Image: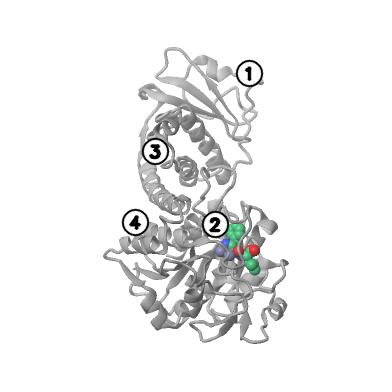
Amino acid sequence: MRISHVKNASVREKADCLVIPYWKDEKTIPAIEQKELPLFLKEIALDDFKGESEESMWIYPAGEKEKRFLLLGLGKRNNTSLENLRRCFSAAIKKAQEVGGKRVNILLPVKHKIKDNLFLRSILEGVFLANYAFNRWKCESLKKRSFSLVEEVVFIGADRKLLQKESSEISAIADGVYLARDLVNENADIVTPQKLAEVAKSLQNRKIKVDIFDKRSIEKEGMGLLLAVNKGSNKDPVFAIASYKGKPSSKEHIVLVGKGITFDSGGLNLKPTGGIETMKSDMAGAASVLATIQVISKLNLKINVTGVIAATENSIGPNSYKPGDVFKSYSDKTVEVVNTDAEGRLILADALAYVVDKLTPTLIIDIATLTGGVIIALGEEVAGFLANDEKLADRLQKASDATGESIWRLPLYSRYKEMLKSDIADLKNSGGKRSASAIMGALFLQEFVNDIPWAHIDIGGASFFSIPTGYYTTHATGFGVRLFIELLKAHE
Ligand code: BES
Ligand code: ZN
Ligand code: ZN
């Protein structure tokens, strides 16, 4: 999407629509200072349009540069927020898409208490994040039926320099979000562990070193849990490391670890109808880790970050690993697999233990579609997180507040560890009960990170929306990319 600006409304060019923002209760005047607007727009006294947040209304003026005007409600000026701005402008973009609007003029609202750069940034975020579709499996006629992605946005009244700076950064971040969404939305037989390895490999550049471990190297390393989960699959597992060095002089080293189950059938503990249909999304953690590394490199962040993914299908077949069997992890701890559907924690355990052993991390964050329980606890829009370090928890929460990627902390309640004790192994992979499942998953992972500051983000719900909400469109959200980038920028 191209982003440009003009000074004021009188010099704007032809477009498919003009977005005119209004604050609630101030709707007799648009939220702008443009004398050039048609008189009638300054006097919308009718109650048809109230200026509520995300409200919109088409009107069809004669003799204007645009075919249509979109009145866009922003809600009350005094209690507006960055997230409100994102959502309002994403609503406008979705409206423009519905009528096939490829070129959109947007009038910028007048000032209020939010800082200029953050204000513009949030509007741009709303615009970019909503301008996504996954329709490569639709026929041409359905694809084109009135819907079109927006190709160009002209901001009327924007500061040129600020717009350039913010839009180039947001565009790089949005590309990362789109990449993560594409990988999640695409068929499981296309986005295989090998495909994820290819994506990791493609990140390689002057600053990023990529190591791909194939099945043989995974065997050599002794990642017995990743291999166990892989047993039922006709595709080899992959373990990939992408190391970005943006500050070679620093010892600080943040490692992001992503769960890459390219399809989770549940294994022999087969998932039922109603639980299995969305399981191509079980590699969303890996997707957001890879996308984050891509964005970090584009933004040239001065920081050392490594992305690690463990990837395999969790399939069902004669070779599948079996409930009751015991396997040895990379850390040498043995695990009794009581449920083959609790496979994410197994592959992550090997990944985390490897990271601790070999990569000298100063901080580890893993991101995973680990449990369905987190959806029961927090719904689809809020991810759960657990951390063994207060400072890290604080930083994550701040990054969440700034980006609108909502997270909520759950306790690493150590008494529940009792439920992970096994009669025949060092540990079992599930407590066997449905209660506290997001906490149980994290307690299991904690056994493999020693005392390194660590956080676990459970995106069981947040990675994939059944209903398009806010600036999310088809299914995959790309959750995690913006959260990580915000956190890492604050670390620079
Ligand atoms: N991938 C699932 C978790 C999941 C479920 C994510 C629904 C998104 C939507 C995970 O591997 C899983 O099956 N977890 C089990 C754990 C249980 C067997 C201990 C769960 O949450 O039921
Ligand atoms: Zn599972
Ligand atoms: Zn899973």
What kind of element bears circle 3?
loop
Q: Which residue is mark 2?
A: 279
Instruction: Give the amino acid type for the residue marked by disc 1 in the picture.
Output: Ala
Q: Is residue 301 visible?
A: no
Instruction: Give the amino acid type for the residue marked by disc 3 in the picture.
Output: Asp
Q: Is residue 200 visible?
A: yes
Ligand 1 within 8 angstroms of badge 2 C-beta: yes
Q: Which mark is residue 471?
A: none
From the image, which quarter does the C terminus lie in? Answer: bottom left
Camera-side mark, 4 or 3? 4
Ligand 1 within 8 angstroms of badge 1 C-beta: no
Q: Nearer the viewer, residue 11 or 56?
A: 56
Numbered marks: total: 4
Q: Residue at x 46, y 40 (%)?
A: 127
Camera-side mark, 2 or 1? 2
Locate residue 285 relative to residue 173 in the image: left or right.
right
**Label 1 to label 3: alpha-carbon separation:** 31 Å
| 284 up-or-down from 89: above or below | below
Say whether disc 1 or disc 3 marks the residue closer to the N-terminus.
Answer: 1
**Label 1 to label 4: alpha-carbon separation:** 47 Å
Q: Which mark is residue 45?
A: 1
Q: Position of residue 298 (x, y in %)?
A: 34, 56
Q: Residue at x 41, y 66 (%)?
A: 235
Q: Which residue is mark 3?
A: 159
**Label 2 to label 3: alpha-carbon separation:** 45 Å
How crowded pointer 4 is (Cα within 10 Å; few <14, some 14-19, many 20+) is rated as few
Q: Quadrant of ligand 3?
A: bottom right
